[in-house]
Every structure is written in structure tokens, then in C-alpha cells.
Image (spheres, rainbow, N blue to C red):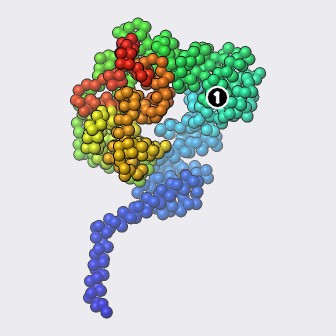
Amino acid sequence: MISTSKWIAGALMVAACAASPLALAQDNASDSRKEDDAFLLLRDSVRRDDAAKAEFYAARLADYSIPSYVDYYRLKARFKEATDPEVRAFLSKYQGSAIADRMRNDWLLELGRKREWATFDEQFPQFVLQDDTQVKCYNLLSRLSKGQNVAADARALLVYPPYYGEGCGALIAALAQTGQFTEDDLWVQVRLAGETNATGPAKRTVILLNGSDKKMGQAVDLPTLALAKGAGSTRADHETFLVAVGRGARTSMNLARMALEKNSPHLTPQERAIGWANLALVSSYSFSPDTAGYWAKSAGAPLSLDQMQWKTRIALRERDWKTVKATIAAMPPQLRKDPTWIYWNARALAAEAGSNTPEVLAAYRSIADQSSYYGILAGEELGQLVTIPPPGAAPTPAEMAAIAANPGLQRALKFFEMRLRFEGTREWNWETRRLNERELIAAAEFAREKHVLDRMVYTSEKTRVQADYTHRYPVPHDDIMQPTTSTLGLDRAWVYGLIRQESRFVMDAQSSVGASGLMQVMPSTGRWVARKIGLTDFVQGMLTDVKTNILLGANYLNMVLGSMDGSQVLATAAYNAGPGRLRSWRTQLAKPMDSTIFIESIPFSETRGYVKNVMVNATYYAALFDGRPQSLKARLGGTVTPKGYTEQEQQEAAYGGR
């Protein structure tokens, strides 16, 4: 039998252990994890439109560390039944926060759907991010209901039908009904919908033109059948057929071309030009020698923004500087002001009148202060190389303390810990948008301390007067990277430049297609490279290990570089789009091409932007590593050549080109 004194001593010991700091910390951590799990279940319940479960989990989070999001999801779960006072109470309680702006976005969509314009008009100016196309359409619809002329604003907004939704569809219908959109405006929308594979908007708009939504759906989704039926007799039939020409060309260029040629006698000159523009756009995605001819036959066609840009790119491939100038001049003002087209217009002017004319130099100067791809190239035309400016003063302890206490950044870190990167990024970006230069520098350093390197890079890039380039171009895991690249003979600056673009240094980054880790290695690629280098114990889970990811990614990049004759431009594109595609593109090259023109005419917009960014990143990393000015043009190389060109042929091509 246990004595009373021993029992009391044991009880006191248990109590002491339970009350120890370690035990309390463990209990708190366990409670926090349970609350985090409940929050994730709340979030998922709302996404599944399960209001009962959402309320159940919200009730368990009365003291959660991020109450604004609990309240948001609780209200969002029953949003269609929520009263205006409830929504206003939420907006008032969390005024100025990212989640309040998100709630206002949701409310504006609901108000627009219900056509409650008085409240919509009151709330729309308070919507800070203004990043929802459908909300913008509702705003124009509200203005239209008051008799305002909004046609010009609508034309500028309505450029990508997949984003339209109910709001933009209703706007187009109202513009047609009031006569602010002409038939030509509506057919522009139909063609855009066909070009972007947006079947719903195409069908809804063609009804406004007394066309057949069934035929239009077939033209977008089953173009071969639509082409077989021919052009028909009405304008609606003709336009539907032309949509099918563009869609069908994506499957068989020859079939679509033959259908257009066969039906050309039944089409007006402008309709024939539209058909050739549709073929030309699809042909532009290859390096086919027929593409320039297709664009020549499209003269007189009203072109979409994408068609305008591709017509310019094909003129660049042909070194047809006169057409380059003309197509850029025909672009809308906002597109013409893009650094891409400012640079190429200057190149076209220089090709005709010389590089040192005042107009050319003024164009280069207008963008040379930008650290973007074309800003750097313009700077090099003026004799400026890439250098690293000295950093500003380091943030003070007081500045760091203020940033660490920022509630929005604290919420962001909490979300990052929970692997809710979308929410964390939204909170971080919302807070940093209102910071001054000194605060941005402190926030970037704070992100470094917390190992959130993607936000460190993002925050540093927002500074304009001062910048710490070790924030913008970090070198984590260099103890692994240096020996790996040295052994392979790889350019370390280039590899870091690629990682910066691939993952922004988020180690657990996962792409939509399954690529993992810093270098975004696909599982199949990882297995293949592991076999090649003798890594016999490789399993897919190792892709998120820093050392393994860098080892496999760097070896794969080295293999791709070798297969691309040592061209960093080609290897970078191949790393993103796949070596097979690059081999195909090179096969279609008839002769060497200026590397900057090759990059600008890469068929995939993602790969095109990727190559530009990686090469800029690598140039800045080289400037950091070498401590001396660097040339982006030198890194790009003079030309991209077809496979098998001799060294003498490459030199002749480089000498003969600009």
C-alpha cells in the first residue's frame, strides 16, 4: 500500500512536470496544430460550399490567431443569404486589411449580379486592388445603365474572353442593345473568343448577331466539321467559318488553308484577310517559312492584340524593318508603350537611319533606366553595362522591430508556416504595397531572417532609390551549389538565375504538372538523371531535398546545354519547354537568327518570358559574383543557329547580321 506522503510527493512531481515550461509549450503547440487543422477544414468546407460544416469548424476557432479569416470564411459560407449590414460590419471591423478587400471583391460581384447599382457604385471606388475583370465589367454596366457612353472603355477592357463571366457577357449584350457596340464590335468579340478557345462567350455573342450558337460551338470545339460545311451565305455563316479556320489550323494547317482557299470566292476581301490572319497567327507559333506569306495576305484585316504582336515578330524574323515599324505604329497606345515594342521600334529605326539618330537614342533612353530585359538591352545600345549599385544603409533595429510587429506580415508568416502560400503571399504583398523605401528594405531583410526568400526578392524589387542586391539576387545553399557547378563546369550565375525564375527559392514549391523543389525537377526527369549519374537510391520524395534537387537539376541542365551546342539561350528555353520542342524549332530554322529575335519569337509566351528573365538574372548574378560590369548581349550570344551549322557559317552569319 502506498503511503500518504509518497502519494503526495508523486502528485506534486506530476503537477510540476505538467506546469513546466517545456510541457506548457508542447501543450500550446498541440493546441495550435489542432486549431490550424480546424482552420484548414473550415477553408475546405467553404470551397466545397458546405455551410453547415463551415459553421461547425468556425465555432471551434473562437480564439484563433487570425480571426479575420475565420470571420471571412464564416460569412462567405452563406454569402448569398448574408445581409448588407453583416457585410458592412465585416468591412468596418477589418477596414484596410487584405481580407476586407477580398470581401469587397466578393460583394461587388454579388451586387453586380443582382444589379444593385446604388450600393455597387458606393463600394466600387473603395475596391483597392481593382484586379477582377468581371467587377470592372459590372462597373461599366452600372455606368451604362445611367446613360453614359462606355464603349471606348469596354473595348479596352474586353480583350480576353476566358475571364469574362456573367458580368462581361451582360455588358456586351447591353452595349449591343443600346447601340454603343456596332456589329463590327461584336464580331471582334466573337473572333477573340474563337482565338482564345472560349466557347461560351463565342456562343453568347453570336446570338446577339442572329447567328447560330450551335454552329459557333462547333466552329470552336469541332472545327473540322465546321470547315467541311463551308462558308455559307450570310455574314454570320462567314464569320463562324473563319473562326473554324483559326481553330482548325491548330490541328491541321494544311486542311484549314485548303478550306479557306476553296471558300475564298464566297468571302469578301476583308473576310479573306481575316481568314489569312487566323492562319498566320497559328503558323507564327512555328518557324515555318510560310508564315510571312500568310501575314502578307492578311493585309486589311482587323487584328487582335495577339495578332498585331505576332505579325511584328514574324517581320523581325524576316528582318523586314519596314513592316516592323508599320505594325508597331498600328498598335494601340498602351501596347506601343511597352518596353518590348519601344526597343524593337528603335531597332527598326536604327536599321533604316542609323543607330545614332536622335529619334533612336531618345527611344533607347526612355527605357534604359529599367532593369528589365529590354531596358538592359537598350542601355547597352547606349554603352551602359549591368553593374551592381552600392547598397543603402542597413535597416536599424528600430526599423526592423517595426516591421516585425506589422500584423499583416505576421499573418503572412503564419500562412507560410501552414503552407498556405496563396494567402501568405496576398497578405505580404498587401502590406508591402504601402511601405516606403526604408520600410521595404527592412521588410526584405525581415523576409531573409524568416527564410521567406521569394518575398524577400519581391519586396526588394519594389524599391526604386535604394536596393540591396543580395536581397534581389540571393545565393542560398551555395555550399552545395559551388562544388556542384564547379564539378560540371557550369556557369553558377546562370544556374542561380534559373532557380530564381523557377521557384524563387521556395524549396517545397510544386508546379501544376508535378515539378518539385528549387530547380523544379519533374519526377520522370529526376529518375532519368539519377540513372544517368548512378544515383541508385533515388526515390521521388528526394526531390524536395536541397542537395538532391540541385544535384539532379544541375546535371540535367548540363545535359541539355550539351545537346544545345553550349547555347545558354537554347538550353534555358529547353529547360522550360522541353528539349524536343527546341530541337523542332531549330530544325525549322532556315538560317542563323539574331538571338534577341529568336527569343522574342519563341512560340510559348511562358517560355519567352522565362528565357528573358533567366538571362537577366544570370547577368546580375555574374555582376555580383565577378564584381565587374556585365553584358547581357554577350551572354545571349550573337545568333541562334540551325543544328549542324559549322563554326565558319556561324561566324559569317554573325558578321552579316546586326
Residue 282 image offset from top left, x and y in percent: 57, 25
Answer above or below: position of 645 versus 118.
above
| In-front residue for pair 201/466 | 201
The outermost residue toward the top is 353
The outermost residue toward the bottom is 1
Counting the numbered discs, the total is 1
- Residue type, label 1: Gly
Residue in view at x 49 percent, y 15 percent: 318
Answer above or below: position of 204 versus 449.
above
| In-front residue for pair 314/571 | 571
Q: Say which residue label 1 marks.
A: 248
Residue 495 image offset from top left, x and y in percent: 33, 36
Residue in view at x 38 percent, y 19 percent: 646
Quadrant position of residue 205: top right
- Per the image, label 1 sits on a secondary structure element best described as helix
Answer above or below: position of 258 versus 89.
above
The quadrant of the picture occupied by the C terminus is top left
| In-front residue for pair 618/355 | 618
The outermost residue toward the right is 233
Q: Is residue 216 left or right of residue 46?
A: right
Q: Is residue 202 in sight in this rendering?
A: no
Residue in view at x 38 percent, y 15 percent: 649
